[in-house]
Image: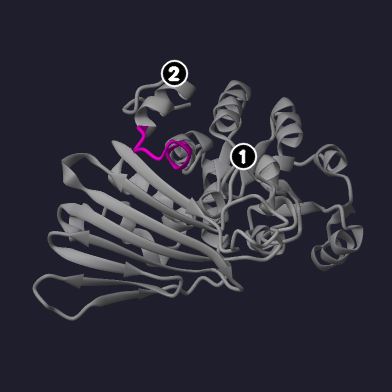
């Protein structure tokens, strides 16, 4: 496969940025873009020399792509993922991949059976400024805690993001997904999680949505390690601060940089975020795996534990008690925590 023919589905939110990253990667030929708002699809198609579609099924079939990039909302993906798998097309999706752990397990198995990749965008793993997160114990020593605070936009809550049936969750599911995913990847599966969910509106107000505006997730890992994630869906912009504490050093991560300060008091080491399009490095990794046949980084199976933690978090909010994500993970996947998923 020389040039990889690609289709992008969904041009709102992250779709425009994803199109630019795909078009800018020399391994891909952007052959089609699709959105139900046809004028938007036509505008981007003109910019990139692609075909425009207002029907996602046609955009998967007619241009005869090799891979499909999904930026449509997770609840809309099911039938189109099934179509892509039936045509043996590789797929790349923004995270979370689907609205439920059950769905992720089903489609992980479906794409494994079709022998084609289903890759999930993972910003923290691909952005060069954060690469030290891949092996944190080499510079941080024994990790013992993390604290994350996320401010997530509160817009569009009258749409699918505010509908628990379509979205599967609110601030925890969407605002803090990347941060929870990184914590699970770094620390492993928590032994217990405890979650409190709340809304910003007072009880007297009528809310046009039924998903949570605020979430606090406490994760207790083995060896007395803990992490907390606080997410508030109130701002107009997305912003986060992430502290990772180890016996040798502490790291502070923000959307602008990663700063590592060691316990000896030496000058902090800062790695600035220079990649302005968040998808560029991830898309490059996807294309490299496709062309080389190497193991796909951030395949959907790598996200099952993250989805199990989030689902257990919602369960804990209902029961008011700490809950075990390992137990739920094994029940849903049939795997023990230490086993590799498909």
Q: Name the side, left or right, on which 18 lies relative to 100.
A: right
Q: Name the side, left or right, on which 208 lies relative to 227.
A: right
Q: Mark 1 points at which residue?
A: 98
Q: Give the range drawn in magenta.
A: 315-324
Give the label on residue 334, or none: 2
Residue 281 drawn at (x, y percent): 52, 59
Q: Which residue is the extreme one toward the front?
A: 204
Is residue 67 covered in magenta?
no
Residue 263 drawn at (x, y percent): 11, 70
**54 versus 14 height, above or below:** above
Q: Name the side, left or right, on which 282 lies relative to 47.
A: left
Q: Quadrant of the N terminus?
A: top right
Q: Which colour scheme is used?
A: one colour
At a point 45% along the width and 62% down the height, the residue shown is: 127
At a point 15% along the width and 52% down the height, the residue shown is: 142
**31 versus 232 height, above or below:** above
Give the label on residue 157, or none: none
Is residue 321 covered in magenta?
yes
């Amino acid at each position: 496969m020389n040039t990889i023919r690609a289709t992008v589905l969904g041009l709102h939110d992250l779709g425009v940025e994803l199109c630019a990253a795909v078009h800018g990667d020399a391994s891909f030929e952007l052959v089609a873009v699709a959105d139900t708002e046809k004028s938007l699809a036509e505008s981007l198609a003109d910019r990139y020399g692609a075909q425009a579609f207002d029907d996602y099924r046609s955009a998967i079939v007619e241009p005869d792509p090799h891979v499909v990039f999904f930026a449509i909302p997770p609840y809309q993906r099911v039938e189109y993922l099934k179509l892509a798998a039936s045509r043996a097309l590789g797929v790349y999706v923004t995270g979370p991949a689907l609205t439920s752990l059950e769905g992720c397990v089903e489609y992980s198995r479906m794409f494994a059976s079709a022998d084609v990749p289903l890759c999930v965008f993972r910003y923290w793993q691909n952005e060069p400024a954060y690469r030290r997160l891949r092996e944190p114990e080499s510079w941080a020593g024994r990790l013992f805690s993390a604290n994350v605070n996320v401010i997530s936009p509160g817009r569009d809550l009258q749409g699918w993001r505010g509908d628990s049936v379509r979205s599967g969750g609110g601030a925890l599911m969407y605002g803090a997904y990347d941060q929870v995913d990184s914590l699970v990847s770094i620390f492993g599966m928590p032994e217990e999680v405890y979650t409190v969910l709340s809304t910003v509106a007072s009880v007297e107000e009528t809310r046009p949505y039924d998903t949570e505006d605020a979430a606090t997730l406490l994760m207790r890992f083995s060896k007395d390690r803990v992490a907390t994630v606080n997410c508030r869906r109130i701002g107009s912009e997305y912003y986060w601060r992430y502290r990772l504490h180890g016996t040798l050093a502490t790291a502070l991560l923000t959307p602008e940089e990663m700063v590592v300060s060691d316990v000896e008091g030496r000058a902090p080491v800062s790695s600035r975020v220079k990649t302005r399009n968040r998808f560029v490095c991830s898309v490059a990794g996807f294309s490299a795996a496709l062309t080389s046949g190497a193991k796909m980084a951030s395949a959907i199976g790598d996200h099952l534990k993250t989805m199990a933690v989030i689902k257990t978090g919602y369960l804990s909010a209902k029961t008011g008690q700490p809950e075990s994500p390992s137990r739920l993970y094994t029940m849903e996947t049939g795997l023990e925590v230490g086993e590799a998923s498909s």
